[in-house]
Amino acid sequence: MNSYARRSALETQLYFASKFYWRLTGQVHPSLITEQSVGGQRVYLVHNPKCGGSTLKALFAVSAKKTTHTFPRLMFRNSVWCDNLFVVSVRNPFDRFVSSYMYHVKSRYGGALVKRYGPSIKDLSPMEYLNFISQFPEKLSAQTNWTDYPSREKPSCDVILRLEDSNTWVQTLARHSILLSAQEVPKRNATPTQSTTHGPQTPLAELLSPDEITAVRRRIEDMFRQDYLRFGYPLMG
């Protein structure tokens, strides 16, 4: 990990500053716009990375191919946020991390991270990757960055779905008066990482020993404890 140049604080600031375009113009990114409305309020999506965002867009039949993982507080004007209805999905933080690791390190991914740091990124261990990816909050940081907004009137998204409950998303959305033509949730970019009461059943089992997996999981729980508590995911204890 020490061989990788760290992303500077200035780079991070410039990245987030570039996302203010949407808030400044009052427009909404095409990949977050749905055809649904409830009581005169438009229904928009928020794409929380590695939490079934592509599945959510497919469910709403969003055709825009490009996406954005920008935090709502940077993306939307207060009037847009408060006057419309927002839907987001969350996920068990450990499973979310595993999905991110498998995507960036173990898949054929060759995007911005590989272009900047080279193919050796594919050799990162899970713990090394966790240290590495922490400098990119837009890729894997607290999920409250995507669910929350600094507004007393509406401090969080109107509908927060759990990826683990995706089989009932259609019914949950209907209870919020969001009626979709689709009756089944399409599975997009799925990674089999769901934790169970018997422990994490993940692709990491093929890479790490049980003790090493436990160490990674405890580190994830320390880093993302707020997400575990906020969204009702069990801690190891």
Image (tube, rainbow, N blue to C red):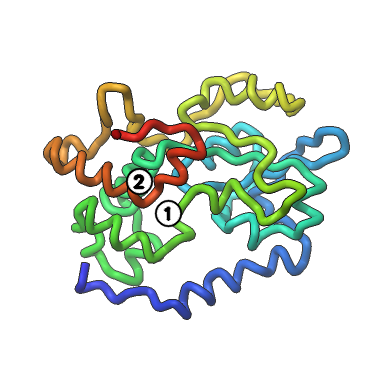
Dot 2, how many residues are within 10 Å of its Cα: few (below 14), some (14-19), or many (20+)?
many
Relative to 174, does residue 123 appear above or below in the rendering?
A: below
Say which residue appears at 68% left-offset and 48% top-offset: 155
Q: Farthest residue to the front: give it.
A: 237
Where residue 118 appears, as percent x and y from the top left, is: 27, 68
Q: Amino acid at mark 2?
A: Phe
Which element carries disc 2, helix, strand or loop? helix
Q: Which quadrant: the N terminus?
A: bottom left
* Residue 128 in the figure: left or right of residue 57: left
Q: Which residue is mark 2?
A: 97
Residue located at (31% from left, 22% from top): 197
Front residue (pair 26, 148): 148
Q: Is residue 17 left or right of residue 105?
A: right
**Circle 1: residue type:** Leu
Residue 95 placement: quadrant: top left
Labelled disc at residue 140: 1
Q: Position of residue 150 (x, y in %)?
A: 67, 56
Who's the residue at 32% across and 74% down the image? 6
Label 1: how many residues lie within 10 Å, few (<14), some (14-19) or many (20+)?
many
Callout 2–callout 1 Cβ contact below 8 Å: yes
The Cα–Cα distance between marks 2 and 1, rounded to whole angstroms, is 8 Å
Q: Secondary structure at mark 1?
A: loop
